[in-house]
Image (cartoon, helix red, strand yellow):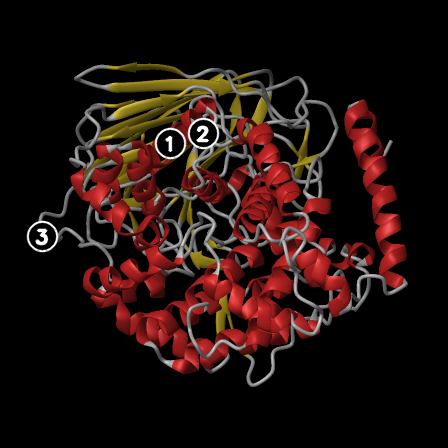
Amino acid sequence: MGGKLRKLFAMSPREMLFRARHALALRRERRDFLAGRFAWSDADWVPRLCGTVGAPPTAAELADWWQRHMRERTEPPFLLAADSLDASVPIYCERFADRLDTLRHQADRAVAGHFAFLGIESTQHPTIDWHTDPKSGYVWQRAFHADLDFSFCREGGGDVKYVWELSRQEALLDCAKAARITGDERYRERVTEVFASWVAANPYLDGINWSSALEVAIRSFVWLWCYQFCRPLESLSATAHLDWIKALYHNGHYLHRHLSYYFSPNNHLIGEAAALYLIGCFLPEFDEAAAWREHGWRALTEYYRDQYYEDGGSTEQATFYHNYCLGFLLLAVLTRQRRGEPVPRRMLERIERALEFTMWMTRGDGRVPRIGDVDNARSIRFAELPLWDFRNLLSIGAILFSRGDMKAVAGELSEDALWLYGAEGLAAYEKLSAQPPEQTARAFPQSGYYVMRSGWDRDAHHLVFDAGPIAAGLFTADVPSSCHGHSDLMSVVLSVFGEPLLVDGGFYTYDEDPLWHRYFREASAHNTVLVDGASHAKFYASNAWSCVAQAEPLNSESTPLFEYVQSGHDGYYGLAPPVRHRRAVYWDRADNFLILDRLTGQGSHLVEVFFHVAPGATVATDSPQRITMSTKSGHTATLELLDNKDLQWEVVENREGPAGGWVGTAYGHRQRAAVVRFFGQLKLPASMSFCLSCTRNEAAPSAPRETAQAATEQMQAGP
């Protein structure tokens, strides 16, 4: 029985019914598309765009009416509102004056047609090819959005994300912001030029850029923010106003009919529902606006619980997507509150715990560890930040929940919080007393993480023990299901004196090269134990797993003298009889960490233990059993095998292929990094223990917060 058939039999009757109805709806939509019924005339547009207006304009008056209306209407409560922006611009110029040169530089690049994303540079000027993958050169055919063939991507022929990323148009935000702040007309002209180019090249439902509801949602956010920045400018013509309004209507019309229920009921669905809700809030004149608001908010309130465990950790087991989804929820909640409408108490509580998880995961250098998949996008992006820095969300959360501890970790008010909250948010933030949490250890029992830290200062140690499920909703049987979690059970990541030392192997791309994709998701790319080369689940094409091992609950003890945590899992895929792994981590609350492993089972097996060293760190050997690792600043850690001398070891670096010493630091970006591999044929049961002893380089200065320019340079590569 094939994987698709097994998955079909695992579906609930409700899901089967939904998919059947969706297939019928697509058939009707395809028929209408091919018949040209979506090529609406201005006469068709009037009742759609002005469905709730008491005296709608005629078709001939539509453009002039919308230009005048958007300058004169009583504004619905919304983010980046006109009066809020008027107050925020001078605050930005005062508080973020050091970013003005960087902003102009980024906007100038966008004007010149220079785009940088997903590890590539692309120059497209004066025209932009919206249907050609700028990396592979593959030209996507023009067809009804649901009829496009993605099979060549899954076979390693390319990656659709590159053409999608270009169409997100996020570089326009820099231009729109620069136009509002500097008054330079070139930037506003570039925004309307690129926007008009995209609209002309992508008729409704036609082609690759209508094939993903999440892509439509992300474009919606970008267009909303760009329009808000540019809308008051006198030079924005009546035609330009109408083009924005029509494009946002198309997006809402699409999202209302294509939310990713059952297809991607994770960050995709949350982002899509949030965009649908915001469009309905911003443009109540639309005939379907009320239905969009109701649909979007209902989806958010029904599915937010599925995104986060009770402890606040993401059910996707990926730190990037944890924060990506969190940003979408924050946008919807802030809009809801701005409108004076209620937000369920339990929803706010879950969001607050998710922010607490981000706070605990944030290291001294301001970044979170790379765990699970990543695609480099940000749900809230008004400023360029290092890829793994999510303190902007903590800044927003500090205001939303009046949390001084979140402010202490976030530092200064983020630019994102300023644009979303305005001057009132700044005043509320400054009233908060910044006080870091008193605790320095925290268990997240449902998501399966344990965090130990020596403090909340810049130079603190920070360890994350990963004993959570690979992802929620996966099957222990041979039923494949997609997710963003990796085969990383019992993995450890560690920063010492504020610098990454042991890191997760990271992620590379979804479809560009199957070998690299699979390597970064399998257990050998994580700081854990392998037996006979087996991972904790069965790899099933792209980002799907089946036959998932089950992790045991965390067992921990925290005292003034030490921290201790342990867990285990019930086996490796394909090994019979099964082999079980238990791992414990002991920290003496100073500079010494013990990692203790025990494997139970029968017979003799190849056992491998991996330690992935941060890019830029060096590795040297002191003795047959001891290895010294040095961070970029010269802090050192000796890694010593304390027992089981049957294990040999090697340092893997500068070799060919995925297993040749690599770490994925961002989507489409990988860096050389040393991997320490202990290995040997062991008769089970067997135990191993390792000691990491850290020594500070007293001459190393404490690293300051990144400047805006440094943040821009590091955005693509990450830490």
Residue extending farthest front = 55
Which of the marked residues, 3 or 2, is nearer the chain's N terminus? 2
Q: Is residue 650 above or below residue 35?
A: above
Q: Amino acid at mark 3?
A: Ala
| Residue indicated by mark 1 | 357
Residue situated in front as seen by the camera: 323 or 572: 323
| Residue indicated by mark 2 | 313
> What residue is at 38 percent from the left and 74 percent from the top?
179
Relative image position of residue 489 (x, y in whole percent): 50, 29
Relative image position of residue 501 (x, y in whole percent): 31, 44
Dot 2 falls on a residue whose secondary structure is: loop
Residue extending farthest left = 699
Q: Amino acid at mark 2?
A: Gly
Q: CA distance from mark 3 to mark 2?
A: 37 Å
Relative image position of residue 421 (x, y in whole percent): 33, 48
| Residue indicated by mark 3 | 699
User: In the picture provided, is 86 more to the left or to the right than 327?
Assistant: left
